Image (cartoon, coloured by chain):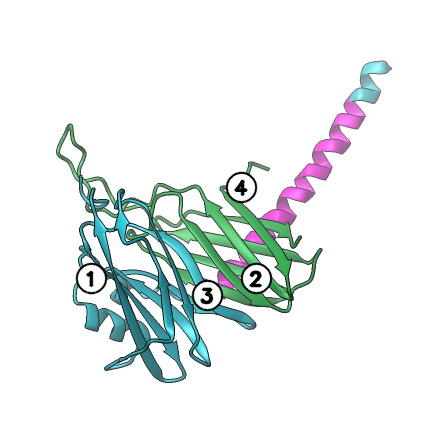
Amino acid sequence: MQTNIKRRIFLKGSAASGVMGVAVTAGLITPQVLLAEWNEAAFKEKDVDAAIKAMTGSESSEASDKIHIKAPDIAENGGVVPVSITSDIEGTTEILILAPNNPVPMVAAFALGEGAEAFARTNIKMGKTGDVVAVIKAGDKTYTAKKAVKVTIGGCGG
Amino acid sequence: MAKSSIKLRAKVKNDVVEVKALIKHPMESGNRKDKKTGEAIPAHYITEVVCEHGGKTRLTASLSGGVSKNPYVSFKFKGGASGDPITMNWKDNKGESDSIESKIK
């Protein structure tokens, strides 16, 4: 009798966790359907201007001093270069980070959602010394700014 | 449920929610070679990170192999309150994915 009760509790427990599992799976599926398509062309492009065009659809961009790039002057480890970008340009919708000297210049693109501030921060890899380029998309215009980063140990290749 | 690969912190300060996420992922660019065998290490990196809150997509970040291993992503948004649920999910070029649900502090 004792064992029977335990068995019953055990069965109840496993049934409950089964339901949980289904709920979690359902929760995982929904957001993925909403995902925008990853822009493969822009992330394969070797040319900086062409990569920006592929990502934003904009032919030319204007240099702007309203974009602030925070990155180290000298990166000891090219594998982890913290970069944060803040834009004072009104109507900023996208923030792109590029490293023109990398094998693939386009590093990351942040599409800002509703209410998002014009700020993004991530860590990037830099193969060698060069610029970090920030591109801001606001309306149908794009603006750029760059900052030189000296890399002492490369992060791409070995 | 297995522990999520995402560490998510969201904090409200002066009406602005600052979201910081650290994701455990190798982020192989596909350009590296195995030093011993000389064989190319296949690309394996996160392509997209999406953060949702209050039924709205707050950020869609497209990443590439140019982002550091165990990527860190941070951004800010307005319109969140302490205690609100917030979710983040990622998927990579191999079709793997993960997600996390947290609360704004």
Task: Select label 2 or label 1 by which is in front.
Answer: 1
Measure the C-alpha gap from mark 4 to mark 3. Answer: 25 Å
Q: Which residues are magenta?
A: A7-34
Q: Would you say B44 lies left or right of B36 here?
A: right
Residue found at the very far bottom of the displayed protein: A140
Label 2, secondary structure: give it: strand
Question: Residue A105, image x and y in percent?
Answer: 22, 61
C-alpha separation, residue under disc 4 versus residue under disc 1: 33 Å
Which residue is depicted at the point 25% across and 46% down? Answer: A78
Circle 1: element type: loop
Q: CA distance from mark 4 to mark 2?
A: 16 Å
Q: Which residue is mark 3?
A: A119
Q: According to the image, label 4 marks what residue?
A: B4
Whether residue A35 is visible, yes or no, is no
Note whether A38 is above or below B38 in the view shown.
below
| Callouts 2 and 3 in the same chain | no
